[in-house]
Image: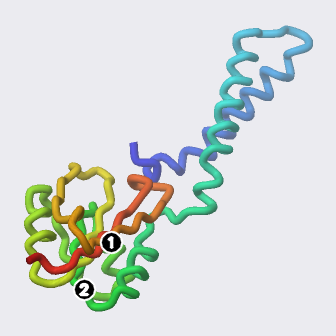
Amino acid sequence: IVPRYLSYLLVPLLVVLATGSAAVFERLSSRPAIVRTVTSFVVIGVLGARFVVLAPDVVRLPREAYKDVAAMIEREGPVAVLAYVRNTEGLAHYLQRPVRHLQQANEVAAAVCGSSEAVAFVMQPFALRPVNVPCLRRTGVRHHRFEQYARGDEMNVWFVPPGT
């Protein structure tokens, strides 16, 4: 389930939870309902714990690291940009230049390793098949990992010198 399709339901759901829990807790002294009370405490506790776990990353990290990746590529200089990501629009927006979108897993290794010019290879492991790109392990390749709090939790950039 993609969160953006259900996020509008979060506030009404929390209101229902708060109202129901308040009704259960209000009757605690007169007519205790053990199962409902325990369930209310567990649900509130789980939601609170989940918030404590997620909140630091949401505040500290970008949703997607396209801006940081583009800044790193711009600092590197004029290189061709090959991207194995689900959507290249964000990267192209920040780079303000074309990005070659590698859509099929079987075309990635040939495009990156067979390039006659230096390339920046961007990969975001969100909803894509993993690929083996052997030239990413050769001498002279530099790797940078960018954390993000959504869509695969990371974005990777490899600067690959021209193939020999």
Relative vertical location of residue 52 with respect to residue 115 in this rendering, above or below: above
Residue 82 drawn at (x, y percent) = 21, 73
Name the residue at 86% across, 22% down. 26
Q: Residues within 10 Å of mark 2 (few under 14, many from 20)?
A: some
Q: Residues within 10 Å of mark 1 (few under 14, many from 20)?
A: some
Q: Specify the amino acid type for callout 1.
A: Arg
Residue 36 drawn at (x, y percent) = 71, 15
Residue nearer the viewer, 25 or 48? 48
Relative vertical location of residue 58 with respect to residue 118 in this rendering, above or below: above
- Give the position of the N terminus as an image quadrant: top left
Question: Whole-Å distance between the Cαs marked 1 and 2?
Answer: 13 Å
* Residue position marked by numbered label 1 in the rendering: 142
The image quadrant that residue 105 belongs to is bottom left
Badge 1 or badge 2: first in the primary sequence: 2
- Name the side, left or right, on which 141 lies relative to 13: left
Name the residue at 32% across, 53% down. 126
Q: Residue furthest right?
A: 29
Name the residue at 25% across, 86% down. 79
Name the residue at 18% across, 76% down. 100
- Name the side, left or right, on which 42 lies relative to 116: right
- Name the side, left or right, on which 46 lies relative to 2: right
Residue nearer the viewer, 10 or 96? 96
* Circle 2 SS class: loop
* Residue position marked by numbered label 2 in the rendering: 79
Residue 96 drawn at (x, y percent) = 33, 88
Q: Specify the amino acid type for callout 2.
A: Val
Relative vertical location of residue 51 with respect to residue 95 in this rendering, above or below: above
The image quadrant that residue 18 belongs to is top right
- Give the position of the C terminus as an image quadrant: bottom left
- Name the side, left or right, on which 54 lies relative to 154: right
